[in-house]
Image (tube, rainbow, N blue to C red):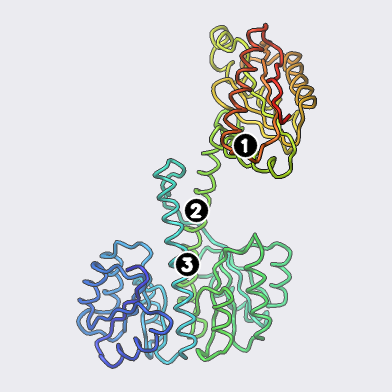
Amino acid sequence: MPGTILVVDEAATSRIMLKVNLSPSFPQISLAASGAEALDKVVRDRPGLVMVSDSLTDIDCDDLCRRLREVSRNAQLTIVVMVGDAGRSRRAQLLAAGADDLFSRAQPETLLLSRLRCLIRAHGTEEELALRESMGRAFGLSEAAAPFEQPGSVALVTQRSTTALDWHSALSRLSRHEFKPFPISEALRWFQTGGSIDVLVIDTTSADRRAVLRLIVEVRSRPASRHAEILLVTQDSGNPILPDALDHGANAVMAFGFDPREALLRIEALLRRKQASDGMRKRLQQGLRDSVTDALTGLYNRRYAEPYMLRLAEASAQSHQPFAVLLADVDHFKLVNDTHGHPAGDAALIFIADLLRDNLRARDLVARFGGEEFLIVMPDTGRNEAQIVADRLRRRLADAPIPIPGRDARVEVTMSMGCCVEIADKGLSAQALVDSMIDRADRALYAAKEAGRNRVALAAASDTD
């Protein structure tokens, strides 16, 4: 199950003790006594997180990490390796093999629990984003991600500026990422003024607890930096800052002191995670925008306009203020296409959309309702005001011949408009009111066409007008 933690250790005592320590906070604990058993359970049970001992004998830990990645159908599987006295080279090997994090067996229980909570939060966020994107693709709101990798921006924050410069020098020799060294006091001011970063690395050795926590909170509270990944570096896994910092929003801990190679592997893992999350968020936002806007004119479409009118009807029922619905249709639009070609017709629609948008209030909605038909919705607008606005829009279009792309010519275009104004009745559902207003505005539009076009017609007033 996705919420399960799988503990893999050949020593029965170690497995049981770890389960006892974890169960109060993480009730779904599964156990495996070998690497082979772990592989079977990952395939069958699909746990969200696997904790692997580095002392397994049936499968080398490096190989097990790689094979866990291969057999897992869960792209967000998190792998933690429990290490003893692993040196720098060994730690780097494990991270390069696919481990997400390395936990010292000697770390305090409070830190162990905080780090696990942090990893599980990150796992849940990745799963949620992936699910939203897959649903978006299913509904045509999002395209599949294109694989990409780009240089990241990394802030290196230490108590002493000389330490930050040393880290900067060591990491810059190993990678193409952009590293920004800061003493912690300067970093706080930088984020307060809108600084953005992909990964923030904080040296917590001998650091002031309040300064570290304040920096993390500041980063998480700012729109430009709230999605940054935060890596804590310490030489003491018993450092009391660490659990609090993780619970305040840090993402990971490098618990064996600063080593450039290990730090770079961790930074690049966090960068990949952030870039993937940012990409999914961007594609979802773009998909949502595309789903509610018209590709040609940039106006909202019918999918957006109808729910908007429902909310406006509900607000009108509470405030007892009228609102207006206008339907505008371009006169003889087929003749424009037939005479001047479809590019001229598209140019006319874009021109009209811009004219409508530029001559309405910011609070008014203008949408492309279909073909050459536009919808205008005006909150807090009575019959007289709606008629004045509609007639002004009609006259401005009639007085503004539209340029034809690629030709030294213009086409004169007019539009007819039907208008309906209502105050929502609390006894009538919002959907019924909206349907009625659109129908009445459409019938008024038809009346304007029948009366000779290039004019405005108002639907008859109801008892609530």
Q: Quadrant of residue 356?
A: top right
What residue is shown with label 2?
279
Rendered position, 128 above or below 115: above
Where the C terminus falls, by quadrant? top right
What residue is shown with label 3?
268
What residue is shown with label 1?
309
Rendered position, 273 above or below 104: above
Q: Element type at marker 2? A: helix
Q: Quadrant of residue 33?
A: bottom left
Separation (CA) of disc 1 from disc 2 = 32 Å
Rendered position, 441 above or below 62: above
State which mark lies toward you, 3 or 1: 1
Q: Left of 307 or right of it: where is 455?
A: right
Name the kind of residue labelled 3 in the image.
Glu
User: How many C-alpha atoms fall within 10 Å of the one at disc 2: few (<14), some, or many (≥20)?
Assistant: some
* Residue lying at 53% horizontally and 36% vertically, measured from the top left: 303
* First reached walking from the N terminus: tag 3 or tag 2: 3
